[in-house]
Every structure is written in structure tokens, then in C-alpha cells.
Image: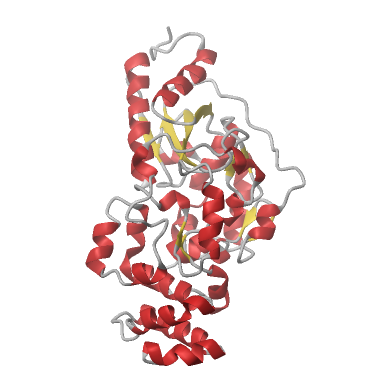
């Protein structure tokens, strides 16, 4: 045994840790080191291009994201895990496309339909860290899930869990990309796994499918145009020129994943936490737009959606209602009219835009009176 209580044969440890991870419900696990120096130029270029938009914390942390030992002093190794979240319905991708085509329905990104993944992944990672401590002795560690300046995709690639797809998400041949990434920094000197290889080939379906053209080149995402950024991270008005492209997407976007051939192999969630709550996978835009602030807080408790708050929720829904087709136009105008005098200036502006958009068409003019416009 080493001084830390680790076996002399450190090469066997990643497989042991991966086995424990699977027992905890993780889809895969791997180990990598902390030297990310060759990833720093790309991170710097992305920030210099302003692709992070209003996510000021990205610029504040800067290259610290690529330097694990600066975030957690003493870190020697990184354990990366995946946790599958796909719906248990084997036809979930087809169902997702059907919802996107039904413009009176609300589309919520599949990862956000259930419980807040941050909490689920971190809790299970904590149990993995405890298992490592019980076997090898106490170790300094911290666990993360989309909650700190960590290059999760790059670390997962180096840990052998897949490759960075052209949409910038991690892809795995057995899991697709419908999984969360979790990170465990530890001061244990673990032997690293071999990195994964790229298997996108010449495919560019994700670039072609992006509704707003946010994937500006293979492996390069301009977050300022990404629907996930616009509906979640952006605090102010959604740029007018991008609003029509949002369609009925009110929280996040899955298009680049839905078209990816590798997601034919996406695994269904093995934990119950990610099952849809409050009918979010079938709810209509008008139903969700009618939620009061109190109802929003109650029904999104324990959900990742809670973080955007009721005001942004209504902003997103107003845009989606404004994108309604002819069949749902009367109901959309009626719903929008109910919040034409909302106390929030942000909500009023988006409601006004949506009403004007619907009323500009002949059909919208005919039903405008039904909404009091």
C-alpha cells in the first residue's frame, strides 16, 4: 500500500471506481489528470470572441476553469461520471419532435422535466467520494455538477467517457449525449484512463438543425444565439430578431441532440428523479402562462427551472405564444391579453411583441377582438 492507503497497483483503481459509480446509478466513470494547459488557448479565444454573452462569471473565472488545482488546491486527479436522463419511453425522441410541432404545447428541454440534476448528481458523487474514503482512507475532495468553473466536457473526454461533438456536448457511442456530467476533484494520485476518440466523422446535422444558428462552426458555439442561453441565462429582453426561431421552446433546446445519430443509443434514466413533473411534457403554453408567481414557486420547487424565476418564465412563454400558428392564435391572443398590463416591464414588452406578431396576420386581425386588442 502507498502512504495514502492506495494499492501499489494504481492502474487498477479507475476500474474499481467505475464499478462503484455504476452501483450508484452512474452510466459511466473515468479518471484523468489535471493538466489542461493545451485546452487554455481555445477557452481564451472563446471568451475573447464574447461568445459567453452575459455570463460574466465565465470571464471572471477566466483560465481558472482550465486549472483544477487553482480552484481546489491539492487536487491531483479528477473522477468524471455520467448520469443518464432520457425519458423511459423508448419513443421519446419522436415524442419530442411531436411536441415541437404542436405549437400550442410548451417544449421544455428533456433534462429539465424532473428534479434538479445539480442536486441529484452531487449527492451521488458525494456517496462515491465516501466509498473511496472507506476503501482507501480519507482524501481531500470536492464534487461539482455544472456548479463551478470546471471544464467538464474536456475532462470527461480525457477520462475516456466520449468525445466532444460538433455541438460541443460530450458524445458517447453507448449513451449518445443525453446524460449529465459530474466531477470529483480529489488529492488521490490516481492513474488516468485513456482519452476518447472522435466519431462525428463528416456529419454536421447538429449545425444544420440549430434553430438560431448558434453552432457557428464545428465545435464552436456562440452562446448569445443559443436558445438555452436565451431562455435560461439571459436576464433581459430576448433579441427581437431571434424570437421567431424559439418556436414553442420555453426552457432550453434539444434540437442538436434530437438529430444526432448517436442519440439512437441514448439510455433511459435509471433513477426516478428525472421523470416529468406537473405534466411539463404535455402542458399547453396557455396553461403555463396562467401560473401565478406562487404556483410557479410551488410547482418548480426542486427543479432546475426554478432558477429563472417567474418573470423570465412569463417572458419565454410570451414569445412562444407569439409564435403560435393559425389554429392556436385565438387562444394565444386571449392568454396574452390577460397579462398585457403585467407589473413587469420585461413581461409587458414581450407580451406586446407577441400580440403584435399575431395580430399582423389576417387571422390575427380577426381574432384580436377576442383578446381585447
Indicate whether 286 appears above or below 341. above
Indicate whether 270 appears above or below 348. above
Q: Nearer the viewer, residue 346 or 71?
A: 346
Tell me if I can see residue 233 in this picture.
no
x 53%, y 79%: residue: 326
Residue 190 x/y as whole percent: 49, 21
Quarter containing the N terminus:
top left
Quarter assignment of residue 171? top right
Quarter assignment of residue 136? top left
- The outermost residue toward the right is 202
- Judge from the rendering whether residue 272 lies leftward or rightward of residue 242; answer left or right: left
- Judge from the rendering whether residue 96 lies leftward or rightward of residue 235; answer left or right: right
- Judge from the rendering whether residue 189 lies leftward or rightward of residue 242; answer left or right: left
Q: How is the image coloured?
A: secondary structure
Residue 26 x/y as whole percent: 44, 31
x 38%, y 72%: residue: 286
Quarter containing the C terminus:
bottom left
Indicate whether 71 appears above or below 11. below
Residue 251 x/y as whole percent: 44, 61
Residue 53 x/y as whole percent: 52, 65
Give the tally of numbered discs: 0
x 44%, y 64%: residue: 106
Tell me if I can see residue 157 in this picture.
yes
- The outermost residue toward the front is 327
x 48%, y 92%: residue: 366
Quarter assignment of residue 137? top left
Q: Nearer the viewer, residue 64 or 242?
A: 242
Amino acid at each position: 500500500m502507498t502512504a495514502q492507503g492506495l494499492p501499489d497497483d494504481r492502474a487498477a483503481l479507475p476500474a474499481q471506481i467505475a464499478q462503484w459509480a455504476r452501483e450508484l446509478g452512474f452510466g459511466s466513470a473515468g479518471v484523468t489528470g489535471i493538466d489542461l494547459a493545451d485546452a487554455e488557448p481555445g477557452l481564451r479565444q472563446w471568451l475573447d470572441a464574447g461568445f459567453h454573452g452575459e455570463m460574466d462569471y465565465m470571464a471572471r473565472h477566466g483560465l481558472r476553469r482550465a486549472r483544477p488545482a487553482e480552484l481546489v488546491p491539492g487536487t491531483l486527479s479528477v473522477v468524471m461520471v455520467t448520469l443518464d436522463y432520457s425519458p423511459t419511453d423508448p419513443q421519446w425522441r419522436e415524442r419530442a419532435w411531436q411536441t415541437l410541432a404542436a405549437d400550442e404545447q410548451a417544449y421544455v428541454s428533456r433534462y429539465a422535466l424532473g428534479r434538479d440534476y445539480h442536486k441529484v448528481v452531487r449527492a451521488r458523487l458525494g456517496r462515491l467520494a465516501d466509498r473511496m474514503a472507506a476503501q482507501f482512507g480519507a482524501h481531500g475532495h470536492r464534487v461539482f455538477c455544472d456548479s463551478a468553473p470546471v471544464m467538464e466536457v474536456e475532462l470527461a473526454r480525457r477520462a475516456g467517457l466520449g468525445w466532444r461533438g460538433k455541438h460541443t456536448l460530450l458524445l458517447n457511442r453507448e449513451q449518445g449525449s443525453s446524460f449529465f456530467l459530474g466531477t470529483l476533484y480529489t488529492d488521490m494520485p490516481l492513474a488516468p484512463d485513456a482519452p476518447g476518440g472522435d466519431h462525428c466523422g463528416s456529419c454536421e446535422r447538429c449545425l444544420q438543425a440549430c434553430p438560431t444558428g448558434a453552432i457557428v462552426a464545428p465545435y464552436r458555439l456562440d452562446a448569445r444565439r443559443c436558445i438555452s442561453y436565451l431562455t435560461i441565462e439571459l436576464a433581459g429582453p430576448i433579441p427581437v430578431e431571434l424570437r421567431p426561431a424559439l418556436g414553442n421552446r420555453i426552457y432550453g433546446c434539444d434540437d442538436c441532440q434530437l438529430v444526432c445519430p448517436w442519440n439512437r443509443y441514448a439510455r433511459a434514466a435509471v433513477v426516478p428523479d428525472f421523470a416529468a413533473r406537473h405534466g411539463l411534457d404535455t402542458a399547453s403554453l396557455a396553461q403555463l402562462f396562467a401560473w401565478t408567481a406562487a404556483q410557479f414557486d410551488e410547482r418548480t420547487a426542486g427543479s432546475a427551472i426554478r432558477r429563472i424565476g417567474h418573470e423570465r418564465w412569463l417572458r419565454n412563454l410570451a414569445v412562444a405564444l407569439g409564435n403560435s400558428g393559425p389554429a392556436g392564435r385565438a387562444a394565444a391572443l386571449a392568454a396574452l391579453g390577460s397579462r398585457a398590463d403585467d407589473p413587469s416591464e420585461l413581461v409587458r414588452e414581450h407580451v406586446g411583441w407577441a400580440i403584435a406578431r399575431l395580430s399582423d396576420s389576417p387571422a390575427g386581425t380577426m381574432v384580436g377582438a377576442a383578446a381585447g386588442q
